[in-house]
Amino acid sequence: MLLRLVPSSIYFNFKYLPVKQAIKIPIFIYKPDFQRIRGEVKITANHIFTGMIRLGMRSTCLFPNNGIMWNVEGRVVFKGTCSIGNDSNILCGASGKITFGENFIATGGVRIASYRNMTFGDNVLIGWGSVILDTDFHPLYDINKGEYKKACGDVFIGDSNWFACYCTVLNSVTTPENCVFGARSLVTRSCNYLPNSLYVGNPVKLVKQGVRLDVKKRSIDY
């Protein structure tokens, strides 16, 4: 792993970060597929240390161990520790901005694409195979009104949200803290999301209130 990790991580850190940060190698990037390596990367954490941000490193055996695709022309901000696992893609257009809160974790096969503004709060957990978009890419044309329908909008994910495997989050979604979304949920702006609640379905529906994720507990404990 070190042979794959060291050269790309050194290049990536000195490409994007101020020298005082880059010499600490705070970002590990494993097997990168650099489609576009432009734009801007910032780390705003008060304490910066080696390997605090890990991109493409193996976190699950359910997806190929082929690192991460980096296709960035806009701005990417890390507020603290971050882990985005193997077989994942980060796409940020020239007009896009992605902000990762403290202790952001995404397991394998995650796709994140921004052409507007996407913000993740602290302690957000994204399950494998999930997709988060702030654009539909292709707007629909309303023939009667003679105009295009809205096809993009800011995404804000609140603190301590958990998205189980294969969830899809579309543009203009805002969630409060402590939301849980069940496997294969389709999360759209059509729902008024409540904190400490569980949502499931396509599109999602509220199924239970008064619940939240406890990251210290695993299902194998029960």
Image (cartoon, helix red, strand yellow):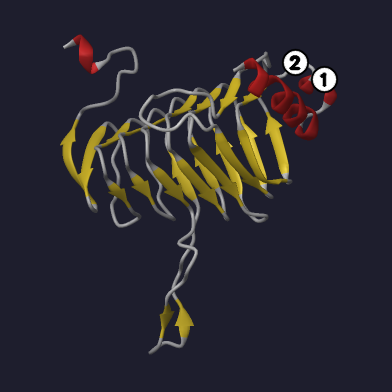
**x and y percentages locating residue 75 in the rendered image:** 67, 44
The residue positioned 75% from the left and 24% from the top of the image is 10
Image-based side of 152 in relation to 173, left or right? right
Q: Classify 1 as above or below 78.
A: above
Q: Residue at x 28, y 40 (%)?
A: 194
Q: Residues within 10 Å of mark 2 (few under 14, many from 20)?
A: some
Q: Is residue 61 left or right of residue 153?
A: left
Dot in front, 2 or 1: 2
Using the rendered image of the protein, determine whether residue 26 is visible from the camera's viewpoint: no
Asked whether the beta carbons under mark 2 and mark 1 sit within 8 Å of each other, the answer is: no
Element carrying mark 2: loop
Q: Answer whether residue 28 is visible to the viewer in this image.
A: yes
Question: Within 10 angstroms of label 1, few (less than 14), some, or many (20 or more) residues?
Answer: few
Q: Which residue is mark 2?
A: 24
Q: Amino acid type of disc 2?
A: Lys
x then y, percent, for residue 192: 29, 50
Looking at the image, is 206 positioned above or below residue 105? below
Q: Which residue is identified by label 1?
A: 20
Question: At x 26% / y 44%, what residue is drawn?
Answer: 184
Quarter of the image where the N terminus is located? top right
The residue positioned 35% from the left and 29% from the top of the image is 62
Q: Quadrant of residue 196?
A: top left
Name the amino acid type tagged 1: Lys
The C terminus lies in quadrant = top left
Q: Nearer the viewer, residue 189 or 128?
A: 128
Q: CA distance from mark 2 to mark 1?
A: 7 Å
Q: Nearer the viewer, residue 113 or 124?
A: 113
Is residue 163 toward the left or the right of residue 83 in the image? left
Residue projecting furthest to the right: 19
Q: Which mark is residue 98?
A: none
